[in-house]
Image (spheres, rainbow, N blue to C red):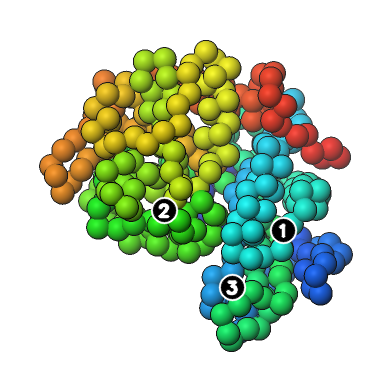
Amino acid sequence: MNTNNDFNPDWSKIGFGYVKTDYNIRCYHRNGKWGEIEISSDENINMSMAATCLHYGQEAFEGMKAYRGKDGKVRLFRPEENAARMQSTSRGILMPEVPTDLFVKMTEMVVKLNARFIPPYGYGATLYIRPLLIGVGPTVGVKPSPEYLFMIFVTPVGPYFKGGFATGDFMITRKYDRSAPLGTGIYKVGGNYAASLRANKEAHDLGYNGEFYLDAKEKKYIDECGAANFFGIKGNTYVTPKSTSILPSITNKSLMQLAEWMGYKVERRPIPEEELLEFDEAGACGTAAVITPIHEIVDVENNKTYVLTKDGKPGPVCTKLYEKYVAIQFGECEDPFGWTRVVEGI
């Protein structure tokens, strides 16, 4: 058994990266049906060099976390939503859908198998969960794969940003588009992230936390913030873009529900770049960091700077949303939405 016997971390210093764990879990789709669940301690995948995932991008993935709570219980956060999003991606690029019950069952299994890697409560660390669906059948012509592999691996991670819940600065890019309005932007496929690497590197090289994309058609409206969704707070309203090229973030969906529960109005609509001047505060949201409050968004090409905090610190609404959201994830408070799912037997 190829396990990680040397794992003995300082949980206060663990970063956001890959750490070998003991097991991953796999299931193949062959001849039109899903097979038996397999447990593996091998980090490698044996597949044909002609696999469609390597040549034609038949690949989808999700990002999730398991949280060790104050009460010692381990919780998942809305895994059914991740299953539904992967099913949507599968329909978009012609892969077989992983049934929700199989998705959730395999997620719970891989968490249990790697229970010793779940960070203890109190460090802000979690067990990151990566479901992956790839076409592994050999194909030379451009067509769907005859065979697929669904697998899930896990890795313990610390906060996405070393500074934790703190503001960041971003730049608007006009030179690059993350996705087209009727392309694959609404699907969680690796190609969208490959398309963002160059713009992201340029932003980092200039000292920014990341890049902001405008809509590809008119270059007028705020689209995505790198690999995260954007939201702004205007008075008593939570505003987030509505677009046919934005990945539907489970974090953003949950924050919209939470904001309404806390008494805020919610609007999903196009957001012109100029409207950034009207927001009291804003944030980028996603699974990895939950919320990254935004200090500045700089339009380098037009020499414009949109300041979204008064003192460089997270605003009050972002702070309230973040604290309540994380408290639900870690079981520190009541879950009024039924979002969390306790993994039994750990």
The one of 161 and 233 positioned closer to us in this rendering: 233
Residue 53 tag number: 3
Q: Quadrant of residue 28?
A: bottom right
**Screen quadrant of the C terminus:** top right
- Say which element carries label 1: loop
Image vertical order of residue 57 relative to residue 169, above or below: below
* Residue 23 on image: x %, y %: 75, 60
Q: Are marks 2 and 1 in contact (CB under 8 Å)?
A: no
Q: CA distance from mark 3 to mark 2?
A: 23 Å
Q: Nearer the viewer, mark 3 or mark 2?
A: 2
Q: CA distance from mark 1 to mark 3?
A: 16 Å
- Say which element carries label 2: loop
Q: Nearer the viewer, mark 2 or mark 1?
A: 2
**Amino acid type at image mark 1:** Glu
The residue where tag 2 is placed is 181
Label 1 Cα crowd, 10 Å radius (few <14 / some 14-19 / many 20+) = some
Q: CA distance from mark 2 to mark 1?
A: 24 Å
Q: Which badge, 2 or 1, comes first in the chain's sequence?
A: 1
Q: Which badge, 1 or 3, comes first in the chain's sequence?
A: 3
Image vertical order of residue 299 relative to residue 330, above or below: below
